Amino acid sequence: MARVPITVYLQPDQLAGIERRAGQVGKTRSAWVADTLVRSLEDELLPLDEILLDQLTKVRAGLEVVAEAQVGRGPESKKGLAELRQRRTDLATRMLAEARSRLRR
């Protein structure tokens, strides 16, 4: 195993978070960062995007089930379901645009 010196620049709140997590598992700050980096390189840690995608997919599936149960079955209910889905899509588009504009600031 090679020893690789690295420098990581952190905000005070990030440093406090690392110190807290390291203390929870009984490691030094450096040991915790090194262990986390190795685990990440070995794909033991899921990227945040995958975790969020998993959770959002489950939420959306649950909402679909609720929406279908509320509108019922039949020709009139299909129209209501289509309208509900369109309203949801429109709202999601607006919310996504708002979130992206916040990230750009």
Image: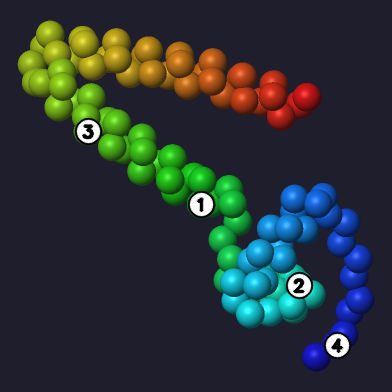
Count neighbours of disc 1 (C-alpha within 10 A) and say few if under 14, some if 14 to 19, many if 20 or more: few
**Which sits earlier in the primary sequence, circle 3 or circle 1?**
1
Real-space CA distance between mark 4 and mark 1, rounded to the nearest whole angstrom: 31 Å
Real-space CA distance between mark 2 and mark 3, rounded to the nearest whole angstrom: 45 Å
The tag on residue 51 is 1
Residue at numbered disc 2: 29
Work out which quarter of the rendered image holds the N terminus and state it.
bottom right
Residue at numbered disc 3: 65
Spot occupied by residue 15 in the image (x, y as percentages of width and height): 77, 58
Residue at numbered disc 4: 2
Count neighbours of disc 4 (C-alpha within 10 A) and say few if under 14, some if 14 to 19, many if 20 or more: few
Element under disc 1: helix
Please, what is the three-letter code of the amino acid marked with disc 1? Answer: Ile
Pointers 2 and 3 in contact (CB under 8 A)? no
Spot occupied by residue 78 in the image (x, y as percentages of width and height): 18, 15
Image check: 95 left or right of 88?
right
